[in-house]
Structure formats: structure tokens, C-alpha cells
Image (cartoon, rainbow, N blue to C red):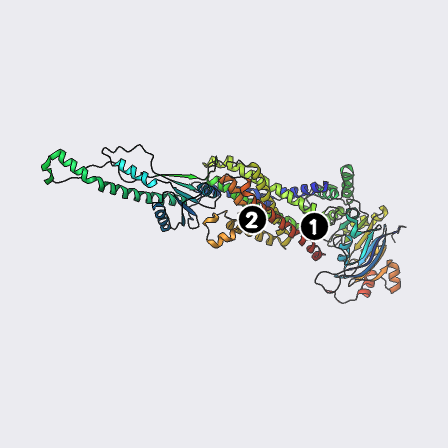
């Protein structure tokens, strides 16, 4: 055990003395987090409706649901209609987990309620009825793009407005003859039938009766924002850059034969590998803490919302560990596989950027083309992001994120086992 | 001539064979060696003869495909950490951490071999002093001269006072003063019971240091014995001439 701590101490000292590595690990993610978050301060994202899943639940069954679907299709938003015995809480739960981007609910009796409101508004003097207003509810995935939210609400507003106008016109048609007749008799007497007719003043302009309530799917105290999304996402991106300094240290040891000196020392191979992983995992976790602190205290000084830690702190700790373990394992593997520093730096950095891109760090997965969406399932950064966004934005807990954590842990383990096997082959090659 | 300690066979290399994966000809083809405790044993041979493979095997870095190696009566293959503690290695390359000063390198490798407390501090001081590095003990290795780096490399292999020290061309590419210091340090080690396996291309070093030498070529021992006896037996005046007589004058690579 003493040798294990000696090795950890050595790794941390080497890292501490590598200025370039420290800049890469701490300054680069800090700059990324601050720039990206501030750039996206007012919008989570600005486009990307094409891959979104929208469900319209029509309890009223009077045709409004189908009309919403048609209107949405006209804007390129794919939406499905659900009628009958629909489990709305389950849909909302799926929405919270990001499986669906929006659920629009048309309550039973909506059409009748709207008609009542129209009739009330047309009463003389414009005094409306006392009944509840006709309300449509739109529940959004907490990470849904602003553009998508605006589009869905726009569709509801357009379709609702048209329906309201139709009902208003029908009501006017129905009551207008009586109103005209009454007005003529009152002012001109029975002979007034021959007089010219003017339209009476009608109270209540068409439009604006349908109330749209838009909300996020059960995030509790967490308010989805650029900070809640970008700080964890770009922190994750930053920690995977541990691959560059870690691979460089391993390459140094290999090229100088220090690695051989370590291998012949009376220390288990497990200690040699695990101490390195432990040291770099610690560095990664420290990196996360620094970035979270920036999200919580520095970014708000630039006018953003502060980063709010999720309620599931234990799950967050586990997520950080799994992400750091995966990143360190990957870095170890790159260090063992690469033959030169240039190879390690280029392959390591580019692979992390690609994994971040297909994993949804830059653009949400659901907003990607189908091919890229299918590729995203193999990105370790995608798994880490899935877990972090679930905690930071959706406000869920361990039960919802454990599959992503398991994938991260297995990825790190596979990388290490592969490296372990490769070490023995390298030994032969070098001798 | 150096004095040979009276001792029992300390290192036994018994019919050792080794082939690299995918290479038809064996790197070591039935090597037999017996090395007594406190002896400096030179392993000479042209490039590709199998010297580094033999050193890697003696250091436990690789295992033989056949045969056995025993150190102080214990098989290297089964001896584990206890046997490895007895071995020190000085690779041809500078196998130290360039970002650490000499003192930290020695401290790290000493700890790795189980040294602690005053024992560790004493060994670090002894090695720094003997390597002539006290004045530079706090400066990072990458700032030191080539000769100093070589001395750090040697000190790291000796910090845990190994019973068997494996040296793979430890004086390549250094100035005369540093070479003299290294050779005089190595010459002292047998007096404290340390056994040295020494590979080199410098025949004068082999003649000056080694009690016995083995000339290997194509993975086999082609001649073995006390240098003076070998010279007499082959009618050669110098080890260089003997070497060429045994391994040929044609290029080996």
C-alpha cells in the first residue's frame, strides 16, 4: 500500500510540474465554460427542431389535436397524436428524461369551454362569463431548445386563434339577426324595417381567449439555463482532455525506459496502473470542482444565472467518479497505443472533440441528423453528458442515470484491461 | 586484476531460450551462465547478439520460453517481489524522471523498493555523495549535463543497495571524467557483496572491471571465462582483438 501512495505522489508531482498540462486541464476548460455559457446566455440553443418528438394528447376529441399536428408538420416539427386512455404522467416523465421534447395536452371539454367563452364575450357590454378559461398545456423537456419551444407555442397559438375566430364568427352569425331586429324596433318603431341597417358594436375582439400554459417537466428547484447545461457539459469535455498530459507522461516513461524500471520494481502491476488512474481521477475531480465553482460564483458576476447543484449529490459524486475514471482509462490507453507525443496529442485531442460533438456537448443529440444520433450512443462523452444533464437540468436521481454510469465505468475498465494486455506486448517489443 | 570473492554460485542461467513473437531465429538459444556473488560479469557481443534480451530477462521484465534463472537459489519466475527487491537495473537510456531533481528521483525509487525513514535518507545521501551530485541534488534532471544524468541513472539503480546490479552499457555517450567516476564506483561495489552483470561495447572497460566475461553471438555463448585466460587460449593480445576473432569482422546489422 505504501508503494501505491508513493506512486500516486509521483504522478501528482509530475502533473503539478507540467505547466502545459495544467493549462490544458484547468485554464482551457475554464475559458470554454465561460465563453460558451456567456455566448449562449439567453438561449439554450437556437435551432434544431427536426429531430424533436412532440406528442399531442387530445382528451377532447373534437379535431383540434389533428389540426395541431398538421400545423406542426407545416413547420417541420414531427408530432404524434394520442387520444383515448393516455397515461399523461408517464408522458411527462419521459419528457423530463428527454425521450420526448414536448407534450401538448388538450383537456376534455376544451371546445365547449372555448365556445362558452366566445358566447360570453359577445354579450352586450363585453362582460365575459365567470367560467374557467379554455386552457391548453404544453410541457417541455427541460433542455428543449428555445426555438422549439417558441415553435410549439406558436402552433398552439395559431390553431387556437383560428378555432376561436371560427367560433366567434359562428356565434355572430347566430345572434346577429336578433340583435339587428331589436335595435331597429327600439329606435325606429315597426316602420323601421325599411331603414338602412348598421352593425352593432360587439364586445370582445377575437383572439387571445385560449390560455397556453408552458412549463418544464418536473425539474423542481432547478431552472434550466445555459449555465445549468453548459457548465457540466463543457466541464466533461475539459476532463477528457486529461488524455493529452496522461498519454505524454506514459510516453515519456516508455521512451526513456523508466517504464521498464517501474515494471521490474517490487510493486504489483495493479498498483502501477491503479495509482496512475487514482492520481489522474483526483486531478479530474479537482478540475470539476473548479469549474463548478466558476459556474456558481464567477459566471453570475457576468449576468448569468448561478449554477445550482442538483439535489442528488451522491449521484453527482458517482457520476464525476465514473466520468473521471473513463477519461483516465482512455488517456492511459492512448499513452500505451501511441508511438510519439505528436500521435498522442493529435489523436487524443481530436478523438475527444469528435466524441464531444457526437455525444451532444455542442448540439443536443435530438437535434442531430439521424445518422449522427445513431453514432451518439457510442460516445463516452455522450454517456457522461446524459448523466450530468439528467442531474443538473432534469433534476432526476441515480435511478435514471445508472445505465449511463455503468457504460462509463465499463468503458474505463475496458480501456485499462486493453492497456494492461498491451503493456505485456510492449515489454516484448522493447526488449 | 580485480579480486574475486570466494562465494557460492549466486546467479545461475540454465539453458535459457527466448524468441520474440513473429521472429524466426531465437534471441537466446540455450544460454548457460554461472555468476558468483560479488563478481563483475561482463556480457559482450555485437549488436543484436542478445545482450539486452538477457538483461531484460535477468531483470524479470520478460520470462524465458525455456530453461530457468535462479538468483540466490530462488527462481526468478516464481520469486515475486522478494527476488525483485534484490535486483537493480541501469538501462541504456536515461530511465529517470527529468522533471524531478536527483534527490526526488532517488527518494521515489528508494520508496518503491521499500526503503523508509532514516534508512531511505541515508541511502539517498550516500548515493548522491558517491555520484558527485550533492551540489545539484535539488536541480531538475533535465537541467543537468549528460554525465550528471548518467550518474543519476546509475544512482537510481543502486539506491536500494541491490544484491544484483544489471548494467546495460551505462557509460555510452559521456565525458571521460564522468566515465571514470562511474567505473570507479562500480569497481567498489563487489567489495560490499554486490554482483554486477555488465554489458558494454567498450572492451577496455570490460578488461578493467570484469572478473569473468561471456561473449555471446546469435543468442549463444561462444566463449566464457576469465579475460586473461581467454586471451591466452585464443592467442590474442587485447579483448578487442579477441572479440573480433570470436564474432567476425563483418558488419552485424
On the rendered image, what quadrant is the C terminus of chain B found in?
A: bottom right
Q: Tag on residue A429?
A: none
- Give the total number of marks visible in the rendering: 2
Could you tell whether A129 is left or right of B19 in the image?
Answer: left
The percent position of residue A238, horizontal first and vertical second, equals: 55, 45
Q: Quadrant of residue B172?
A: bottom right
Give the label, 2 or 1, closer to the camera: 2
Residue A348 coordinates in the image, percent (x, y) = 58, 51
Residue neighbourhood size for the residue with mark 1, other residues' Cα within 10 Å, grouped as few (<14), some (14–19), many (≥20): many
Q: Tell me what residue is drawn at x 76 percent, y 50 percent.
A: B89
Q: State which tag comes first along the sequence, 2 or 1.
A: 1
What's the distance in space between the residues labelled 2 and 1, CA to CA?
28 Å
**Pointer 2 indicates a residue of which chain?**
A
Extreme residue in the right direction: B6
* Nearer to us in this view, A283 or A192: A192
- When asked about the image quadrant of residue A208, the answer is top left
Q: Which residue is mark 2?
A: A380
State which chain disc 1 sits on: A
- Residue A387 location (% of width, % of height): 53, 43
Q: Are marks 2 and 1 in contact (CB under 8 Å)?
A: no
Q: Is residue A94 left or right of residue B53?
A: left
Q: Report the side of A21 relative to A189 (left or right).
A: right
Query: Helix, strand, or loop for circle 1?
Result: helix
Is residue A241 something that shows in the picture?
no
Which residue reaches farthest front? A85
Residue identified by numbered label 1 = A259
Query: What is the quadrant of the N terminus of chain B in the image?
Result: bottom right
Q: Residues within 10 Å of mark 2 (few under 14, many from 20)?
A: many
Amino acid at each position: 500500500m505504501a508503494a501505491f501512495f508513493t506512486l500516486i505522489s509521483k504522478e501528482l508531482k509530475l502533473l503539478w510540474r507540467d505547466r502545459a498540462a495544467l493549462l490544458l486541464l484547468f485554464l482551457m476548460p475554464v475559458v470554454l465554460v465561460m465563453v460558451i455559457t456567456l455566448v449562449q446566455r439567453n438561449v439554450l440553443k437556437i435551432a434544431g427542431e427536426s429531430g424533436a418528438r412532440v406528442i399531442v394528447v387530445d382528451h377532447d376529441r373534437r379535431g383540434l389535436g389533428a389540426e395541431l399536428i398538421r400545423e406542426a408538420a407545416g413547420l417541420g416539427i414531427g408530432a404524434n397524436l394520442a387520444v383515448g386512455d393516455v397515461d399523461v404522467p408517464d408522458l411527462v416523465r419521459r419528457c423530463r428524461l428527454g425521450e420526448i421534447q414536448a407534450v401538448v395536452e388538450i383537456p376534455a371539454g376544451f371546445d365547449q369551454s372555448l365556445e362558452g367563452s366566445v358566447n360570453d364575450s359577445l354579450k352586450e357590454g363585453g362582460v365575459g362569463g365567470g367560467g374557467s378559461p379554455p386552457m391548453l398545456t404544453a410541457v417541455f423537456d427541460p433542455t428543449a431548445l428555445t426555438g422549439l419551444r417558441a415553435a410549439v407555442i406558436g402552433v398552439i397559438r395559431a390553431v387556437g386563434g383560428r378555432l376561436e375566430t371560427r367560433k366567434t364568427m359562428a356565434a355572430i352569425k347566430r345572434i346577429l339577426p336578433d340583435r339587428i331586429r331589436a335595435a331597429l324596433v327600439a329606435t325606429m318603431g315597426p316602420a323601421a324595417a325599411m331603414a338602412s341597417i348598421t352593425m352593432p358594436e360587439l364586445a370582445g375582439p377575437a383572439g387571445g381567449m385560449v390560455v397556453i400554459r408552458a412549463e418544464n417537466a418536473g425539474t423542481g428547484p432547478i431552472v434550466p439555463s445555459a449555465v445549468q447545461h453548459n457548465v457540466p457539459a463543457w466541464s466533461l469535455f475539459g476532463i477528457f482532455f486529461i488524455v493529452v498530459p496522461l498519454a505524454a507522461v506514459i510516453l515519456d516513461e516508455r521512451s526513456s525506459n523508466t517504464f521498464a524500471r517501474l515494471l521490474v520494481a517490487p510493486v504489483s502491476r495493479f498498483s502501477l496502473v491503479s495509482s496512475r488512474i487514482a492520481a489522474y481521477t483526483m486531478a479530474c475531480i479537482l478540475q470539476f470542482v473548479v469549474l463548478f465553482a466558476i459556474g456558481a460564483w464567477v459566471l453570475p458576476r457576468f449576468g448569468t444565472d448561478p449554477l445550482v447543484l442538483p439535489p442528488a449529490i451522491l449521484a453527482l459524486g458517482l457520476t464525476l467518479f465514473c466520468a473521471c475514471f473513463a477519461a483516465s482509462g482512455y488517456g492511459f490507453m492512448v499513452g500505451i497505443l501511441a508511438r510519439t507525443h505528436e500521435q498522442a496529442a493529435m489523436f487524443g485531442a481530436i478523438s475527444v472533440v469528435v466524441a464531444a460533438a457526437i455525444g451532444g456537448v455542442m448540439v443536443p443529440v435530438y437535434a442531430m441528423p439521424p445518422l449522427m444520433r445513431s453514432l451518439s450512443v457510442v460516445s463516452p462523452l455522450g454517456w457522461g453528458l446524459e448523466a450530468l444533464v439528467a442531474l443538473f437540468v432534469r433534476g432526476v436521481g441515480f435511478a435514471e442515470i445508472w445505465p449511463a454510469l455503468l457504460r462509463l465505468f465499463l468503458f474505463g475498465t475496458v480501456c485499462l484491461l486493453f492497456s494492461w494486455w498491451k503493456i505485456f506486448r510492449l515489454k516484448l517489443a522493447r526488449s | 586484476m580485480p579480486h574475486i570473492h570466494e562465494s557460492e554460485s549466486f546467479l545461475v542461467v540454465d539453458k535459457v531460450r527466448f524468441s520474440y513473437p513473429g521472429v524466426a531465429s531465437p534471441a537466446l538459444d540455450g544460454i548457460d551462465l554461472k555468476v558468483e556473488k560479488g563478481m563483475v560479469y561482463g556480457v559482450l557481443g555485437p549488436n543484436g547478439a542478445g545482450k539486452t534480451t538477457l538483461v531484460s530477462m535477468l531483470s524479470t521484465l520478460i520470462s524465458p520460453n525455456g530453461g530457468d534463472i535462479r538468483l540466490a537459489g530462488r527462481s526468478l519466475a516464481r520469486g515475486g517481489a522478494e527476488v525483485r527487491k534484490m535486483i537493480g537495473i541501469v538501462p541504456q537510456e536515461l530511465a529517470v524522471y527529468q522533471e524531478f531533481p536527483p534527490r526526488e528521483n532517488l527518494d521515489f525509487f528508494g520508496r518503491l523498493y521499500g526503503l523508509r525513514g532514516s534508512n531511505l535518507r541515508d541511502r539517498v545521501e550516500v548515493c548522491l555523495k558517491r555520484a558527485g551530485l550533492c551540489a545539484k541534488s535539488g536541480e531538475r534532471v533535465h537541467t543537468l549535463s549528460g554525465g550528471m544524468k548518467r550518474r543519476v541513472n546509475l544512482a537510481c539503480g543502486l539506491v536500494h543497495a541491490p544484491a544484483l546490479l544489471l548494467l546495460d552499457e551505462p557509460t555510452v555517450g559521456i565525458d571521460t571524467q564522468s566515465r571514470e567516476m562511474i567505473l570507479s564506483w562500480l569497481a567498489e561495489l563487489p567489495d560490499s557483496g554486490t554482483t554486477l552483470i555488465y554489458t558494454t561495447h567498450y572492451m577496455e572497460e570490460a578488461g578493467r572491471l570484469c572478473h569473468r566475461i561471456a561473449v555471446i553471438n546469435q543468442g549463444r555463448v561462444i566463449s566464457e571465462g576469465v579475460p586473461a585466460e581467454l586471451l591466452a587460449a585464443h592467442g590474442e593480445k587485447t579483448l578487442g582483438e579477441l572479440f573480433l576473432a570470436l564474432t567476425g569482422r563483418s558488419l552485424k546489422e
